Image (spheres, rainbow, N blue to C red):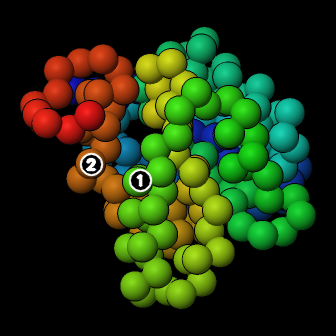
């Protein structure tokens, strides 16, 4: 199964061309090599809720991505608004995946408790917020990678081999 994946980077400096988007490069590598996914859209927007919301809606409703991975805007700074923007777009949250990311990474780095990213569903798309650093992206995505195919099968309405889970 080739999962159609979109990457959204929320970064004021990245949107102005002042910072190379190395976190998105890590996402691209993990999606292509570990998940067998295909990148169908990639965008950098400033840390503005309306721009994040518009990009998420376009990636889900127009590009019909199975998976949208965001990077950036998930910590405590005043401009970190990705989780709030994501909440305004999703129809249902998937708290267990966000909890798994925090729990796994906190075993190595206590600062992971400051990560506010969420995971949720819009239509038939799974949206996952990731941190803004390459290391944070890698650690958090690795924490859920083994469950992503199963989650995507369920979200996209395809067959799930699990029974008894509802």
Rendering coords of residue 62 (x, y %):
60, 12
Q: Give the residue drawn at x 53%, y 69%.
A: 136
Classify residue 146 as left or right of residue 85. left
Whether 156 is drawn above or below 85: the answer is above
Number of other residues with Cα within 10 Å of mark 2, as a class: few under 14, some 14 to 19, many 20 or more: few
- Determine the secondary structure under disc 1: helix
Residue 97, labelled with which disc?
1
Q: Are marks 2 and 1 in contact (CB under 8 Å)?
A: yes
Q: Give the residue drawn at x 75%, y 40%.
A: 85
Q: CA distance from mark 2 to mark 1?
A: 9 Å
Classify residue 90 as left or right of residue 155. right
Q: Is residue 21 visible?
A: no
Rendering coords of residue 102 (x, y %):
48, 69
Where, quadrant-wise, is the N terminus in this rendering?
top left
Classify residue 160 as left or right of residue 104. left
User: Looking at this view, is 88 or 164 the one in front?
Assistant: 164
User: Looking at this view, is 77 or 27 the one in front?
Assistant: 77
Q: Does label 2 or label 1 sit earlier along the sequence?
A: 1
Q: Give the residue drawn at x 57%, y 51%.
A: 118
Task: Provide the residue designation for mark 2.
Answer: 147
Number of numbered markers? 2
Classify residue 148 as left or right of residue 9. left
Rendering coords of residue 16 (x, y %):
88, 50
């Amino acid at each position: 199964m080739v999962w159609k994946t979109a990457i959204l980077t929320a970064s004021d400096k990245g949107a102005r061309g002042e910072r190379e988007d190395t976190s998105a490069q890590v996402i691209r590598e993990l999606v292509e090599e570990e998940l067998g996914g295909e990148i169908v859209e990639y965008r950098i927007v400033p840390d503005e809720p309306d721009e994040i919301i518009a990009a998420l809606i376009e990636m889900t409703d127009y590009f019909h991505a199975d998976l949208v991975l965001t990077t950036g805007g998930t910590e405590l700074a005043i401009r970190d608004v990705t989780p709030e923007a994501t909440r305004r777009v999703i129809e249902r949250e998937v708290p267990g995946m966000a909890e798994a990311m925090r729990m796994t990474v906190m075993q190595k780095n206590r600062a992971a408790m400051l990560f506010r990213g969420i995971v949720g569903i819009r239509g038939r798309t799974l949206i996952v917020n990731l941190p803004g650093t390459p290391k944070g992206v890698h650690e958090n995505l690795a924490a859920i990678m083994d469950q992503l195919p199963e989650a995507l099968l369920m979200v996209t309405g395809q067959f799930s081999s699990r029974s008894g889970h509802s």
